[in-house]
Image: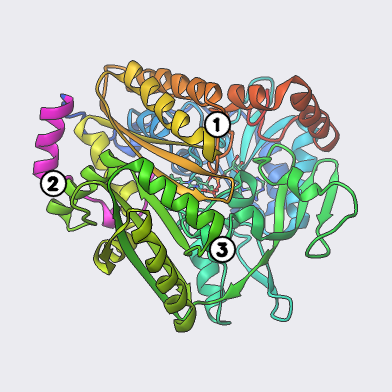
Amino acid sequence: MLWSGWGDPAKAAELPERVGELLTALLGVRPAGPAVPLGEVRLRPVALPAPVLAGLSDIAGHDHVRFDDETRIRHTRGKSTPDLLKIRAGDGSDAPDAVVLPGSHEEVAALLAYCSGNRIAVVPFGGGTSVVGGLTASGHGFAGVVALDLSRMNRLLALDATSMIADLEPGVRAADAERMLAGHGLTLGHFPQSYEYATLGGFAAARSSGQASAGYGRFDDMVMGMTVATPGGTLRLGRAPRSAAGPDLRQLVLGSEGAFGVITSLRLRVRRAPAEKVHEGWRFASFAEGAAALRHLAQRGPLPTVLRLSDETETMAGQAASEVTGGPEAEGGCLAIAGYEGTAEDVRTVRERVSAVLPGLGGVPLGEGPGESWAAGRFAAPYLRDSLLGAGATAETLETAAFWSALPGLYQEVRQALQDRLGSPLIMCHISHVYETGASLYFTVVTAQADDPVAQWERAKEAACQAIGRAGGTISHHHGVGRDHRRAYAEEIGELGVAVIRAVKDRLDPAGVLNPGVLIT
Ligand SMILES: Cc1cc2nc3c(=O)[nH]c(=O)nc-3n(C[C@H](O)[C@H](O)[C@H](O)COP(=O)(O)OP(=O)(O)OC[C@H]3O[C@@H](n4cnc5c(N)ncnc54)[C@H](O)[C@@H]3O)c2cc1C
């Protein structure tokens, strides 16, 4: 992973000249230049004394405790646009003092006990792709901060093909999980845009949702069980597909973002690998018309595996990009993508039924071209963000969800708030996940960078968060809370809700060393 941006540096995307010209003409963007060299990132000296570092080595092994500059920089914050703007400018002030790579549940448990005893803050670190400040722990009042990198815990532990469940370690990346399961003819079906780098533990800890959630469900739907190491002891949760044995403690750990404990193994529901995958495009005259069609499918069926709808601006931007890059095309209106996965028979049947329903709801079939080019290019957008940053444009995303009846108001309020704060930004949106009762909205915002682009975005983000609250949306559908949504989350769950979360944390993590400042204050 590129330390100052996204993904494999070999796949870096050059911004086409024409797009650069358009950005200048439409948004007044001026080039911002490249990231500082790695050697110029400013770091605090390591705060942990040698005997404490030796204590960590005694547990995890000498080779698995690192505090060289590059390793610390690579574990600084996550991959939100403000995170990237800061690190590109050489600001390494949130770097951990050391990075520890445990190899087992027992080592994690021992490290948590050690860190609790020595007042060392611990940040569980999966793929490092958090976009909500989930990896930026506050070291204030602690002897230092340690990132607990789970990448060595990357095995498929067991497979129960009768029950269709797999036990996996938390550091397995989504792409590797698919490779491991493919050998058994199985799939997890979790394909977020961060698929190549994000890990199973991170998905559970942040309640992730993948692009094929209409067919496979959200990640939290897949979690049948888990083992969680906490300073207060080990939780072993989930022994049946469903249970009436009291409140479901798995739900307490899902979304807890490392503030309660470290997930050291996951028991996940798996599915048979699809024999066929087909994606197609549909055009609707307006976002409202397309949303009504998606609601129809979500409530009455048939439901494709992938179902998403871009608004007019996102469709237009996609179209402009396609002229340059060969991406999806939709000839105006709003582009919807429907994907079908399963046996050839499943794919044919569901596709035929969808094709029979959508024309009556205003849908115009565009065939497989736009669908397949969306599928082929769907992991490429984060690379483009790096080029936009260099070109002087801030490109950032935010997401929310609401019941269907509240969705149009939510869409308008968020757009208005962003416009009021940013002048004339490019605001694009799509419906990214659908349910019987509602859907999520995913916004992408592109604007010219101000002199202080981090403060500029933070003001816009705060306005958008307030708009989400006013319009009755949730502060996050799938990115989580982290530090960035902490205030809005507290408002969403209320004072009593915060007190309940606090009480759970105090019992599991009495010294408060786990990811301090994330989720709640
Ligand atoms: C370009 C890009 C695209 C993205 N697309 C999507 C998308 O389509 N869908 C989506 O849901 N999200 C998306 N995300 C957000 C991010 O990928 C998810 O939040 C993901 O769940 C994080 O996984 P990770 O392994 O990178 O976790 P990290 O970023 O390493 O950690 C996330 C949080 O979980 C905690 N944590 C990590 N591992 C554990 C563990 N084992 N036990 C306890 N706590 C742990 C961390 O401390 C942190 O608070 C995207 C992010 C980027 C940068």
- Estimate the x, y position of residue 518 in percent, counting from the top left: 63, 31
131 left or right of 324? right
Going from N to C along the chain, the mark reached first, 3 or 1, is 3
Work out which residue is located at the far right of the displayed protein and give it. Answer: 245
What residue did someone put label 3 on?
Answer: 216
Dot 2: element: loop
The image's mark for residue 473 is 1
Q: Residues within 10 Å of mark 3 (few under 14, many from 20)?
A: many
Task: Give how far apart the Cα atoms at labels 2 and 3 are.
Answer: 35 Å
| Most foreground residue, 4 or 453 | 453
**Kind of residue indicated by mark 3:** Tyr
Residue at 60% of width from left, 59% of height from top? 152
Pointer 3 with pointer 1, Cβ within 8 A: no
- Estimate the x, y position of residue 422 in percent, counting from the top left: 31, 20
**Kind of residue indicated by mark 1:** Gly
Task: Give how far apart the Cα atoms at labels 3 and 1 are.
Answer: 24 Å
**Kind of residue indicated by mark 2:** Pro
Pointer 2 with pointer 3, Cβ within 8 A: no
Part of the protein shown in magenta:
1-27
Residue at 34% of width from left, 62% of height from top? 375
Verify whether residue 321 appears in magenta.
Answer: no
Q: Which image quadrant: the C terminus? A: top right
What residue did someone put label 2 on?
Answer: 16
- Estimate the x, y position of residue 63 in percent, counting from the top left: 59, 54
46 left or right of 446? right
Q: Is residue 34 visible?
A: no
Residue 166 placement: quadrant: bottom right
Dot 3: element: helix
